[in-house]
Amino acid sequence: MEICEFLKGETVMKIRIGIMGYGNLGRGIECAIKQNKDMELVAVFTRRDPASVNILTEGVSVYHVDEAANMQDKIDVMILCGGSATDLPKQTKEYAKMFHVVDSFDTHANIPSHFEAVDAAAKESGKIGIISVGWDPGMFSLNRLYANAILPNGSDYTFWGKGVSQGHSDAIRRVEGVLDGKQYTIPVEAALEAVRTGNNPELTTRQKHIRECFVVAAEGADKAKIEAEIKNMPNYFADYDTIVNFITQEELDKNHSGIPHGGFVIRSGKTGWNEENKHIIEYSLKLDSNPEFTASVIVAYARAAYRMASEGQSGCKTVFDIAPAYLSSQTPEELRAHML
Amino acid sequence: MEICEFLKGETVMKIRIGIMGYGNLGRGIECAIKQNKDMELVAVFTRRDPASVNILTEGVSVYHVDEAANMQDKIDVMILCGGSATDLPKQTKEYAKMFHVVDSFDTHANIPSHFEAVDAAAKESGKIGIISVGWDPGMFSLNRLYANAILPNGSDYTFWGKGVSQGHSDAIRRVEGVLDGKQYTIPVEAALEAVRTGNNPELTTRQKHIRECFVVAAEGADKAKIEAEIKNMPNYFADYDTIVNFITQEELDKNHSGIPHGGFVIRSGKTGWNEENKHIIEYSLKLDSNPEFTASVIVAYARAAYRMASEGQSGCKTVFDIAPAYLSSQTPEELRAHML
């Protein structure tokens, strides 16, 4: 167990992190731990053959998921990097029996039931489970809450992008004759500007976002038919102005291999005895790598989980329940002196 | 004592607020309370003759400050609207003996000692004292903390404006031959754009902000001399590109009577095993009324003070120590269901 001496010369134990699942998010967690000197990566767990998984950190082993239960004395916080559809509804409550856990559960409609399940497990084990961490849900949620509490008389706007939507990219690839594709969600600049005037415009789905697709068609495929099928796809594209660009696989690989994302949370509100003054609160993210940024948020909340548990707290928490100071490696005194 | 029934049909007591000091900030607090249905204004306290102070809320009385000590059973949270130079260093710790208190103490260098004094008083009385609430310190501080915790490898940038600086306006008015004046702090657009590229530019004071002055000169005054004196004033203007406009008192009154402000907190950071991905987190405010927005933040934190105290907490807190959920009038369940 390593000793960490960065905090004002005090001897502090590093927070021992496990990563459950090694896809884009798991790899992002590994990179984020490298930037946080009060943490160390202890183990990565996978459902695949551990020998087939190569990680970046020297001296750290990859284990089969079944080994995790045997490592409860070696890991403080287990970060769950599975998907929200099937992995996390099972895993988070299960691993909350053994470790402090953090997940990025993002099926908004099911957050209340997920919370209840994790809360029951974590209260019984005396662990902390932080759910739905990342940027939306996560930092965007926080900004919605703060802005609503400050300006109760106002309107909320969330714009996403410019960024890659995995779900929409998958939808493109299911169209007959499509070999590969990527979809960017793009906020409409005119809509952003209208919101920033403070006039609280009502905006339709079509007015808020454009969807731009880059599509690799099979040889001889009917491109007009593909384009029409994409543009008319219900739920995914029909309610939007959609642009379809046909490109080669080489172009797609060269120019569209990144996973950028971002967006804007804006609240526009009025104050004054007669609502005479307008205010705009805007929070925005411009991210080269969606999974690495999400991972960076999660790792800060892993620190919070560890600290809240050290104070005797347990149960399920969300970003709403966690005082900001828990996220920082600095002491409360340092934060007040330098960041307030 | 009024009953408030807006929370899901439950019967909840309103939070009873007192306002200490009735200038721009105190009046802003009064307006903000009107927008928050779980609060009621109980009394306004002034050092002036109470009969000379007219407030907006019907049925609420103005008292001399000396009366406050007699109203400990009528007020839950006393909001202190005095200045940071001389009022708050005395008042906050004094009134924390009697009430939960919130202030907007903004002398950054003295925050640690102010914290200690308020903490000692509030711990002894079992009250909560929240200090340095507003937007800077306040929401800007919070955004610095969150962004630093998420992106430990990066650079911070704070820009102020476009907005009125009271201190710089006062400095203009002290110049010989000046009858009246107002100063706007304006962020340099090119500097903002450079920061948003993610290239972490190093920016001088002059590169970040412009100072624009609107000056009413006395009849026959030497305008060239006034302009030179303003532009060369150490600390206030000498390190900036300063624009001086001479206008009439009528123009000043007509076009420059507002108190707008705002600004930008930007963190630019890198992630990835080899720091290959850039990220920009940006928080900005565009405020028609600086004091009314500050007041709106304070009132949300007054709610937090009341709730934290209801759980048995006491002592001095800053925005860093307060979980976001405490600020909202919604329940934790509602927040998870609708805002996460």
Image (tube, coloured by chain):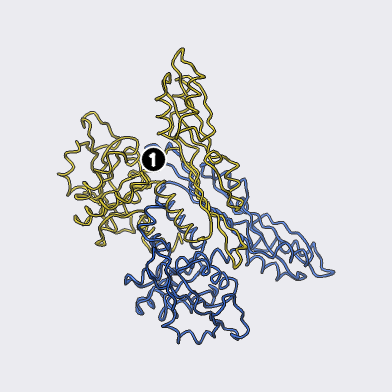
Chain colours: A yellow, B blue
Q: Nearer the viewer, residue A242 or B163?
A: A242
Q: Residue reaching furthest left?
A: A70
Residue A36 visible in rendering: no
User: Residue A120: x and y, percent?
Assistant: 23, 54
Name the residue type under label 1: Glu
Residue A234 visible within the image: yes
- Where is residue A332, by image quadrant? bottom left
- Direction from residue B285 to residue B95 in the image, left or right: left
Q: Chain of mark 1?
A: A
Residue at the image position 58 percent from the left and 66 percent from the top = B291
Residue at x 28% of width, y 34% of height: A55
Quarter of the image for residue B112 reads bottom left
Q: Nearer the viewer, residue A26 or B331?
A: B331
Question: What percent of the width, then of the height, locates residue B256?
Answer: 70, 63
- Residue neighbourhood size for the residue with mark 1, other residues' Cα within 10 Å, grouped as few (<14), some (14–19), many (≥20): many
Residue B57 locus on image (x, y percent): 56, 75
Residue farthest to the right, as pictured: B220
Residue behind mark 1: A292
Q: As drawn, is A315 to the left or to the right of A146?
A: left
Residue drawn at x 41%, y 29% as measured from the top left:
A171
**Front in this rendered view, residue B191 or A298:** A298
SS state under label 1 = helix
Residue B80 x %, y %:
50, 75
The residue lying furthest to the front in this view is B9
Q: Is residue B47 left or right of residue A173?
A: right
Residue A251 appears left or right of B175: left
Q: How many marks?
A: 1
Residue B304 drawn above or below residue A198: below
Looking at the picture, does residue A156 appear above or below residue A335? above
